[in-house]
């Protein structure tokens, strides 16, 4: 029975390796449904394998759930968490760029792990300079308000613009930032 094999995998590394190999196609299948900005498929696959490992190590037969159902849930959640973390770091980076030292201090005192803090700190000055050069003052204000979760209407009211103008400027900002990210990725 598969479930008893999973239970044995908790204490037997060889059986665990067999389980991970046997269920890798499931991880590949789930990973293909997702996209990680700035990442590669292998990154998602690795996160999925971590989810599969966690599933194998925490599976409980007494819960009357099939392992494949439990593993699918664990794999999916692990991948989604990785994507959310990457997105959160991206937004932290944009906020840092716009709010200078104030936000950088908040980031460095936050719950990010030391490696993420180092990466954010190391890249902040270059990205800040690039974005400051690429965006006009009004575009910076719009982006800052947008990243603070203001609606188009709220941004329009605060800056005395039309909603259509805010929409057009956000499209311009996206194009400029996309171009900057492509340039930086190529270096």
Image (spheres, rainbow, N blue to C red):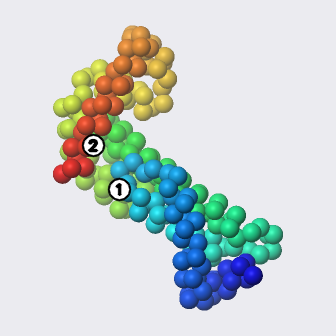
On screen, residue 75 versus residue 121, left or right, reads right
Of residues 143 and 44, the one nearer the viewer is 44
Of residues 123 and 182, the one nearer the viewer is 182
Element under label 1?
helix
Of residues 183 and 31, the one nearer the viewer is 31
**Residue at screen point 35% across, 56% down:** 117
Residue 135 figure quarter: top left
Tell me if residue 118 comes above or below residue 185 in the rendering. Answer: below
**Residue at screen point 56% across, 87% down:** 13
Q: Position of residue 118 (x, y in %)?
A: 31, 58
Q: Residues within 10 Å of mark 1 (few under 14, many from 20)?
A: some
**Residue at screen point 31% across, 25% down:** 172
**Residue at screen point 55% across, 58% down:** 30
Tell me if residue 69 comes above or below residue 56 in the rendering. Answer: above
On screen, residue 32 versus residue 182, left or right, reads right
Q: Which mark is residue 117?
A: 1
On screen, residue 133 versus residue 159, left or right, reads left
Q: Nearer the viewer, mark 2 or mark 1?
A: 2
Q: Position of residue 14 (x, y in %)?
A: 56, 89
Q: Which mark is residue 181?
A: 2
């Amino acid at each position: 029975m598969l479930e008893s094999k999973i239970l044995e995998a908790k204490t037997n590394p060889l059986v665990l390796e067999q389980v991970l190999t046997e269920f890798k196609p499931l991880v590949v299948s789930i990973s293909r449904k997702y996209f990680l900005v700035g990442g590669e498929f292998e990154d998602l696959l690795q996160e999925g394998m971590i989810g599969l490992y966690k599933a194998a190590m925490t599976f409980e037969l007494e819960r009357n759930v099939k392992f494949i159902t439990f593993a699918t849930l664990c794999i999916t959640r692990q991948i989604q968490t990785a994507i959310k973390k990457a997105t959160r770091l991206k937004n932290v980076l944009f906020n840092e760029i716009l709010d200078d030292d104030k936000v950088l201090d908040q980031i460095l005192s936050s719950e990010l792990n030391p490696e993420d803090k180092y990466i954010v700190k190391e890249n902040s000055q270059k990205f800040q300079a690039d974005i400051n050069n690429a965006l006009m003052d009004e575009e910076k204000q719009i982006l800052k308000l947008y990243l603070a979760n203001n609606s188009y209407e709220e941004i329009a009211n605060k800056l005395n613009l039309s909603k259509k103008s805010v929409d057009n400027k956000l499209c311009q900002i996206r194009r400029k930032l996309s171009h900057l990210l492509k340039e930086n990725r190529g270096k």
